[in-house]
Structure formats: structure tokens, C-alpha cells
Amino acid sequence: MDRKRELTSVDLAALCGEFGDYEGAKVDKVYLYDDGLVRFRMRDFDRGRVELLVDIGETKHLRVADPENVPDAPGRPPNFAMMLRNRLSGADLVGVEQYGFDRIVTLEFERGDEDTTVVAELFGDGNVAVLDESGEVVDCLDTVRLKSRTVAPGSPYEFPSSRFNPLESDYETFAAKMDDSDTDVVRTLATQLDFGGFWGEELCTRAGVAKTMDIAEAGDEEYEALFSVIGDLRDRLDSADLDPRVYYEGSEESGDGEDVGAGAADGEEADADRGLRVDATPIPMAEHEGLPSEPFETFTAALDDYFTNWEAEPDTGPEDGGGRNRPDFESEIEKQKRIIEQQRGAIEDFEAEAEAEREKAELLYAEYDLVDEVLSTVQQARENDVSWDAIEEKFEEGAERGIEAAEAVVGVDGSEGTVTVELDDHRIDVDASMGVEKNADQRYTEAKRIEEKKAGAQEAIENTREDLAEVKRRRDEWDAADGDDAEGGDGADGDDGDDEPEDVDWLSRASIPVRSSEQWYEEYRWFHTSDDFLVIGGRNADQNEALVKKYMDSGDKFFHAQAHGGPVTILKATGPSEPAKDVDFPESTLAEAAQFALSYSSVWKEGKYADDVYMVDPDQVSKTPESGEYLEKGGFAVRGDRTYFEDVAASVAVGIKCEPDTRVIGGPPAAIRPAVETSIELEPGRYAQNDMAKMCYREFKERFTDESFVRNVASPDLIQEFLPPGGSRMVDE
């Protein structure tokens, strides 16, 4: 049988009931792993250390794990993890709830200065969104822009359309949902009632109803039996009457149906006797009757055992590679194709909606005098304290007398302050507090907003096409595999990667060794000039303060964009542990430092392509303001003569280094291109920072044969660290 890869809606209902025991646990730290695992390390007064794991990778689930089952902390945390640490450090977990009957869980955290909600989406490709107190998305692992919903930083979080909850339904509603189907009973339970395939079969077995019975042949007897077992399930979940189990696919040596008991087995040898773990459930399953099982005190403990051993246990099927455990690539491919079709439909809808808004704006102008008369009538009446109901009656009377403007009014909404007019078979809501021009401008603005959503949907299609290509690649690799890793084993030519020849074609190489190192300056913006001088810049006001106070020495140079709102940029003459000295910097280095200071300033965010930058010596920079002046945090007073660099171009390149270490870097193109194997040049544009990071990541994956190498060293999070604030576009090369 197929192994469990993700939690069902019933699983989540049981799990969230258990999580109430962990309310009050305080967050210490949050980690994000490359495979989509988010780890919340917490401490509880009664239990001590608590490890809450949310996995949106290959196995979509969440659980409280034994500390021994938690992976080692990853390396330098990406931006998403740092954001979570800043918001959640010291916060209390106050609630864990399932959204309706969907595979969505909300984690509520409270802290004195701010409350945070973490939404874990355990369906589809999976996602984690972080919301502020108002429900606005602070950040998310994946941006979602579809016709039905949007999940993007800065936008209100939108849950998927509400699904039917069979655990809260009365019998009449349940029977009506069943009657609406045109398939058999088990598929109806799985799709119409949202139980999914496995629980659809389980409910039929418990109720004694034939799974393949056509719904047209089912009557009250079958419906009542099914509704009764659903009621029993609801009662067990509500009362936390669970009996969690981990099920095994028994080996020939293990007796079928044997309940081995917690702790009855003796280590790996006993696990081998029982066979492969195939499921973890909150209650014993009739569908698994005959399979060996192990009971657990809690469902989260059962899940911890199951998913901890997920990768450790073989899942390759028979040696010929064609056995029962082959992933269902075809279903996944069809799923991705369906998503693409939905996204195409969303784009078409956005185009139609934007065109409709523009058409409404044009109609307002075409019927300017008529609309103006309607608006003026309402505005004058409101100034005279006439009620909205009386205004509506006034228009109705005017329509009866044949007054054209009154005949155009088909609705008045006092709660919204709007009037609905019908123009050329189009009904348009107009704001009665504004004139015709502003109402028309609102329509044009809305059309532009919809066009931006269309661009997001186009980007989403590209991401889905990438996912589709990845599934096809894995399918082809699986089908071509001969059961060993001989080809991969020969990729390194017997060496450890330390003595690579200088002329290696890294883009074509099948396997690239990852060699990483961390430096003190990596928490800041940074790059090395083409003359190998270090340039560092602040990411925020705190870092601006730290750079000037801790790392700026005599002999260094201080750069800043002439425009307000930019990072402190320091061109280092020496390292932090070296004595200060004066250096005659090459002109190329000065020009690159100036371009760095400009590109990461507000100039880029404003969409400008060039501006001026100035340079001064460290002794000209002071935190002491002139009399009567005030310096905000991260700001400095600069006195004396300045050296100006005029019309500096806003331009950044990001690229991937392959030697001597492997990493993504970014900065002025003249400095980055010679240091990397391949690069992408950017200029101010319309794609948001996180979207551009994904576009660059996708482009790099196409350039390198070893796509896993790109995922390891140049993930979207890592690329985003080198992108300027605001929108960007790729420069055609």
C-alpha cells in the first residue's frame, strides 16, 4: 500500500485538539530548513523543551517532536527565519486551530509589543504565511496570486474558499450534499464531503456500505449508516477519545494484525520484523485491519515516530524499480497541468475585469453631464441633511416623471455612500462624495491594480511550469534508474573538490561540490570590488549605526546617495583586526562603491535609473547634530567638502561563484561579473523583490546542469539578500 505522505483533514482535527496542551509555551528561536521545514524551538514550564515542527515539503504535516528527532540547526538563517525570530522571540503560543475542515492550521502567538499569526497551508505545494494583528501578510514562503485568492506580503491574507465541513453538518444537509453527486458513494464522500479518498473508504467500511454503490442507488438506509459513523467520529474527536497508531506493512516473519505494543519491539531489528511504516492515525482503522500496529499515548507522538523514520526507511519497491512504491508521477503531472489551466483562466478573468473597469470609466466620461447631475443632486441633498431613504424616494419620483438623470439611478446605498447608475446596459457604483472625474479615476486605478494581479498570475504560471518540469525530470530519472548510483558516484572523479582545474565548465558539470564559509560582514550588504577591496552597507538604521561606530576606521571612505534614504556605505581600507592605514584607492573601486551606495538606496525604489553619490572621509561623519537640528536613528551629520560622483547608474548584478567557495553574490556589475561563473544584471523595474528573486533562481537553474547545486547555494531567499529594495527587471543581454 502507499505510504502516508501528508495529513488528512481528520488528522488535523485530532491533532489541533492535542495542541491545546502546549498553549503557554514560549518561543526561543525559529529555524527554516531548505526542504520546507519550519522549526519552532520553545520552552514550557511543565515539559521543558518543546520542538514544534511545520513541514510543507515532501511530507506535509506538523507535530511536536522529541528533541532527539529534531535535525541539527541549519547554517545562516534566511530572511524569513530572521523575520520570525524578530517577531516571535519570547512570544507565547496561545492557540492552534484548524481552519474549518481544510488542511490549514493557524498558530497564534502573543507578545507584549505585537501579536503574530502563523498560517500553515498543508495542501498543494504547501505554504507558510506570517500575519500581523490586522491579518496582513508580513511575509510568506511562497507568493500566491490566483483568481480565487492572494497571499502576498503587504496584502490581507485570504483563506481559500470555505469548504463544506461534514463534522458540523446536520442530516438534511449531509443527504443533500450526497444527492448532488453523480458518482459512487466513496467518491462522493471523498470529494463532495471533503473527506479524501482514504477516509471515504474507511467510512464506507465502518458503515457497511458498498464503496462502489452508485449514488443514485443509495437511499436513507445507506445515508443514515454513513451519517451515524461520521457522528461517532465527530464525538471521538470532540472528546479527545483517541487511540493513536502507527501501522506497518508486515514482513513475512511478522504475524498479520499483531499489535506489538509500545516498547515491545527492540530497536532496528524489531522494526525490520514489523516491516515498513505506512500510516499514522489518530484512531484504529478498519481499513488497516490485519496490519501490525504500534499504539502511542498521543497522536503527535505517533506522527513523530512515523515522520522521523520517513526518510530512514526504504521506499523503493521491488528491485526492478517498477513496484508498488513508485511515486505517482502521472497524477502529479496532471495536477500541475490543471493548476496551469486554472492560472490561465485567472489571467483571462483579470484581463476581462480590467477591461470592464476601463469601460466603466469611459462611460462615466461619455455620460458626464448626466452623472454629474446625479452626483450634484445627492451632494446638495446631503448638505441639507436629507436622509438617504428620502434621496432614494426622490429619484424614484423623478424616474416616474421621466427625468433622464433619475431614470439612470437604479440603487442608493447610504451605508456605503454610493449611487448605482445604469449607463449603456452597465451598472456602475459611484461615490456620491466625489465628482465624475475622481470616480472615473478610481475605475482606471482599479484597472491598473487588476493588471498587476494579472502580472502576478503570469509569474505564478512560470513557477508552476517549473514545478511541472521538475516532476517530469524526477519521473524520467526514476524510470531510467538501474538501482544504483554508479553514474552519480563517478561525478567527482575521485577527488574532494579542493584541486579543481581552472578551466572547469561549471555550468555543464553534473555534480558541483558545495564549499561554504562564513565571514563577519555577511550580516550586512557587501561585495568585493574588482580590485578586491571590501565594501559594506547597512540594511537598516540599526546596521547604519553599527557600521559607523564599530567598523569605520581612518583610511576608509564613507559613501552615501545624495537622495534621502540610503544605506551607510563604507569602503574598507583594512580588515577589522588590522591597524588603520591610508590607501590610494583605484578609480574603478571608488566608482563601484558609489554605484553600490546608489543602487541600494531609495533611488532604486523610486524607479530612477541614475542619481548622484558623494564620498567623504570618516572624520567628516558625526552623530552630533548642529544646534537646533535632530538626527533620526541611523542618520549622521556630514561636514566639510564632499567628492561627488554624478549620474551614477542604478545597476546591480547577481551571480553564482563556484570557486574557491560556492555562493551567490551581488553588487555592481563590473565587480560581480569577473568573480562569478554566470550572472544576471538588473535595473529598476516592476517586479517585486521576492518575485525577482524567484525569477533569477529559475534562470540560474536553467543555466546549470546541476540544479541541486543551485538550490543549495542560490535559493530565492539567498538571492533576495543581494537585491535592491523595490521593483526590478532583468536587463536584456
Image (spheres, grey):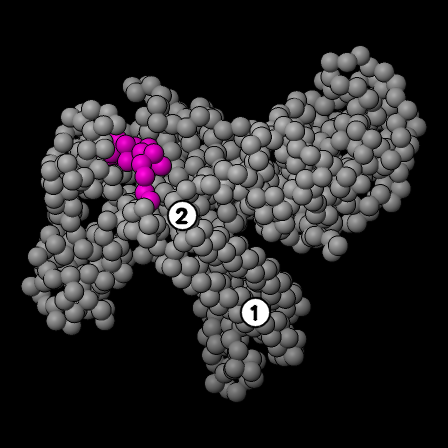
Amino acid type at circle 1 is Glu
Q: Position of residue 369 (x, y in %)?
A: 65, 78
Amino acid type at circle 2 is Asp
Q: Is residue 97 left or right of residue 555?
A: left
Using the image as rendered, state which of residue 307 and residue 510 is in the foreground. 510
Bounds of the magenta segment: 299-316
State which quadrant residue 188 falls in: bottom left
The residue lying at 16 percent from left, 65 percent from top is: 212
The residue lying at 42 percent from left, 59 percent from top is: 333
The residue lying at 59 percent from left, 47 percent from top is: 705
Badge 1 or badge 2: first in the primary sequence: 1
Q: On the image, numbered disc 1 is attached to which residue? A: 351
Residue 237 seen from this side: yes
Looking at the rendering, in which quadrant would you find the C terminus? Answer: bottom right
Q: On the image, numbered disc 2 is attached to which residue? A: 482
Q: Position of residue 267 (x, y in %)?
A: 24, 25
Q: Position of residue 502 (x, y in %)?
A: 72, 35
Q: Callout 1: 10 Å neighbours few (<14), some, many (20+)?
A: some
Q: How many numbered marks does the figure carry?
A: 2
Q: Is residue 26 left or right of residue 496?
A: left
Residue 238 seen from this side: no
- Magenta run includes residue 314: yes
State which quadrant residue 92 falls in: top left
